[in-house]
Amino acid sequence: LQAFDTNEPSTNAVGAAVTINEWMPFNRRFTTNNNGSYSGWLELRNAAATNVGLGGWRVGRSSANSNEYVLSSATIVGGGHLLMWADKGSGGTNQHTGFELATGGGEIALFDSMARLVDAVEYPAVGSDKSGGRSLDGGVCETAYPTPGASNNVFEISSASVTNGAISLRTGTRKGHRYAVQYLSSLANTNWQ
C-alpha cells in the first residue's frame, strides 16, 4: 500500500533524473552533521537507474542565482539520494552548502554544470525537526517524518483494520489537499492500482 498527497505538480522544468527531493530548514534535534552540529539539510534524488556525476552542479536558494554553491565532486548512484548540509560548515565526505535554508519558507534551486536550471522548489514554512519533500508524483508537501538519504514518507497511516474483507485506513489529512491511495492486489503483483 502506498499513499501520497497529490496537491501540487512537479516543478522539474527539464524532466531531469536528479531532483530536489527533501529539505529540513530547522533541524533542532533530528540528526547531526559530520561536525556534530544540528544543521538544516537538503536531499537530492536520482530517479535514473544509472549513476549521475554531479561535479560542477550547483545548488542555491534562488532559481535566479546559479553561483551560490558549486559541488566539487559527488555521484548519486542510480535510484539513490545525496544528503547536503545547509550550513556554513565544512569537512568530511559530506557536502556543506555554505548557506542556510530560510525557516519561514523559501526556494531551493538545482543547476547542472552548465548553470542551466534543472529543478526548483518553493517550500512553505515547516516546524522544528519537520521536513518538506516531494511526493511520488513530484508535488511539494510536508513529510510524515523526515527521511534523509531514503525515500520520502509523505503520508502516514495511523491505523488499519479489516472487516468482512474490506480494509479501512485512518490517517491525518490537510484541508484543501487531495490524496491518492494505491494498492497491490497481492504481494506477487508489481502493478500498483
Image (spheres, rainbow, N blue to C red):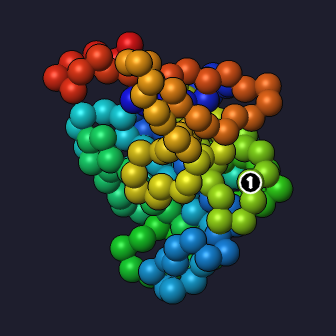
Q: Residue furthest left?
A: 188
Quadrant in which residue 166 is drawn: top left
> Which residue corresponds to the image point at 36% horizontal and 73% vertical from the top-left?
93
Assign a secondary structure to mark 1: loop
> Which residue corresponds to the image point at 50% horizontal and 62% vertical from the top-left?
84
Q: Which residue position holds label 1?
A: 126
In the figure, is residue 26 to the left or right of 74? right
In the figure, is residue 30 to the left or right of 182? right
Label 1 crowding class (10 Å Cα cut-off): few <14, some 14-19, many 20+? some
Q: Nearer the viewer, residue 189 or 57?
A: 189
Q: Position of residue 160 (x, y in %)?
A: 48, 36
Can residue 124 be seen at all in this image of the molecule? Answer: yes
> Which residue corresponds to the image point at 43% horizontal and 38% vertical from the top-left?
18
In the figure, is residue 75 to the left or right of 11? left
> Which residue corresponds to the image point at 42% horizontal and 62% vertical from the top-left?
72
Q: Nearer the viewer, residue 81 or 28?
A: 28
Q: Quadrant of the N terminus?
A: top left
Q: Position of residue 100 (x, y in %)?
A: 69, 66
Query: Callout 1, which amino acid?
Result: Val
Q: Nearer the viewer, residue 59 or 150?
A: 150
Can residue 55 be seen at all in this image of the molecule? Answer: no
Quadrant in which residue 116 is drawn: top right
Q: Position of residue 113 (x, y in %)?
A: 46, 45
State whether residue 60 is above or below residue 1: below
Q: Position of residue 168 (x, y in %)?
A: 51, 27
State whether residue 133 is above or below residue 88: above
Q: Quadrant of the C terminus?
A: top left
